Image (cartoon, coloured by chain):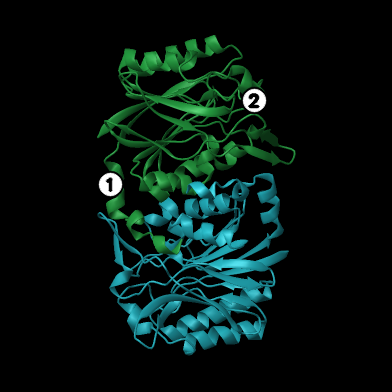
Chain colours: A green, B cyan
Amino acid sequence: MKITIGQIQMNVSQNKDENLEKARDMIQEVVKQGAKIIVLPEMFNCPYQAKNFPVYAEMQGEQTHQFLSNLAKEHEIYIVGGSIPERTVDNQIYNTCYIFDPSGNQIGKHRKTHLFDIQIKGKIAFRESDTLTPGEGVTIVDTIYGKIGVMICYDIRFPEFSRKMALMGAKAIIIPGAFNMTTGPAHWELTFRARAVDNQVFMIGTAPARQYDMGYVSYGHSIVVSPWGEVITCLDENEGILLTDVDLDLVEDVREQLPLLKHRREELY
Amino acid sequence: MKITIGQIQMNVSQNKDENLEKARDMIQEVVKQGAKIIVLPEMFNCPYQAKNFPVYAEMQGEQTHQFLSNLAKEHEIYIVGGSIPERTVDNQIYNTCYIFDPSGNQIGKHRKTHLFDIQIKGKIAFRESDTLTPGEGVTIVDTIYGKIGVMICYDIRFPEFSRKMALMGAKAIIIPGAFNMTTGPAHWELTFRARAVDNQVFMIGTAPARQYDMGYVSYGHSIVVSPWGEVITCLDENEGILLTDVDLDLVEDVREQLPLLKHRREELY
């Protein structure tokens, strides 16, 4: 089953409406070029800073949710809506990805499950848990192309999470994410390739573009990796779109030749 | 805790005695250069072919086992004895790594737990299960330098296995292994780096040298990777030794800055 993935590596400004307009324009462009599944970056409507999350947060069904649903319906495409800060009725804030089908219906929702709290000496410190609540597990959506897993950024660090998705039938895993200038060069490509090879799935990561004037500087480098671990396409750090043709049948092909999932000794782990 | 690792990337001939002599000479060389833990490659006394395993197999305590024990005692070093075919009293054959302390005592033994049965179209086919029985789980040894995990080659493909070792306290994982000319260029370095980054451990892999006239052509590239995922040292394909100074305290340092093991959501996997 062949399909074109369209990724939106966009700059994110302080102005939410501007961010939505930009997303709309870039989505129109990848749709024009044939994309059927569109992936936005993590926190595409809100500059990635813990203090911003409560300020930009919306309830499900509000502005950004409605905006994405409308675009999916208008263009008859799947949208994996990057992520936005979601506020709940009991005033919790989550880092949430909404997923819409070509009718504009929400078919899934992932709340970032592993919060990003790190402190690398002289390099970078960040504490999502200052303002965010963690989600509660794995998200898989059914599409006409097959099952697709969705996680957000730091979730990819935990091999158990991708493994679970693969065992639940995911043929691709989509990850809105924003690695930074320390972890990005060191681990971004490596981690996408590793999850791809270990689980024999396509790994698709969409990052915000790099903006040096932001509090958190994104590494960029939106990427698509094959089930054999090859980087199929990758952007640099600049704002741009990425179109990639993937053949999901390659998953079964690789698994037949190198039957890693069959060779697991589950009783021993 | 600083320590020098010595790796023996040797050619393997049809002649077992010749293989042991070569191992002895190369071990003497790395000891002279300060190595305290010596790692031999997978199947260092037997050309890596399923049909050879029953022919070269020995019971525990026989020639090669005694040879390694004596060398460890003579040089007062740890030896992670690559692997050899082990025959049991009930005539099963295992791909086995014996581990000796500086007194020559066996402190651990790993039987390859995931057997290598693959068939990559037009590239490589191999079926260890034609002659081998799989081992039954994780192996960790206690050394004066800390806990070290030991696995063999294809075992590294399964992220659960390395993860279990890290959770059991391993600060380094040592892997005698022989990737081939298809899987080696594609996945050898990637897999070592991935396990290192995900588990924040040192990963140490020792391969046989490449010999194009062998039935199974080893990729070589014996390697040491840091807990941050950096390749510290790596050989090319030729016969040679590799000496690497590692500081096992780096494990705690990396885990403090990027607390991946603490951030696991174990209840969800």
The type of residue carrying mark 1 is Glu
Q: Position of residue A96 (x, y in %)?
A: 50, 28
Q: Is residue B211 above or below residue B66?
A: above
- Position in image of residue A170 (x %, y %): 35, 41
Residue A29 visible in the snapshot: no
Q: Residue at x 53, y 23 (%)?
A: A84
Residue A128 visible in the current orientation: yes
Q: Position of residue A148 (x, y in %)?
A: 36, 36
Residue type (three-letter) at the residue carrying disc 2 = Gln
Classify residue B124 by image quadrant.
bottom left
Q: Chain of mark 2?
A: A
Compared across the picture, whether A204 is left or right of B251 comes to: left
Q: Which residue is mark 2?
A: A49
Q: Residues within 10 Å of mark 1 (few under 14, many from 20)?
A: some
* Quarter of the image that includes the N terminus of chain A: top left
Q: Which mark is residue A252?
A: 1
Comes first in the chain, label 1 or label 2: 2
Is B263 placed left or right of B136 in the picture? Answer: right
Q: Chain of mark 1?
A: A
- In front of the other: label 1 or label 2? 2
Q: Secondary structure at mark 2?
A: loop
Task: Please tell me which residue lies in front, B241 or B152.
Answer: B152
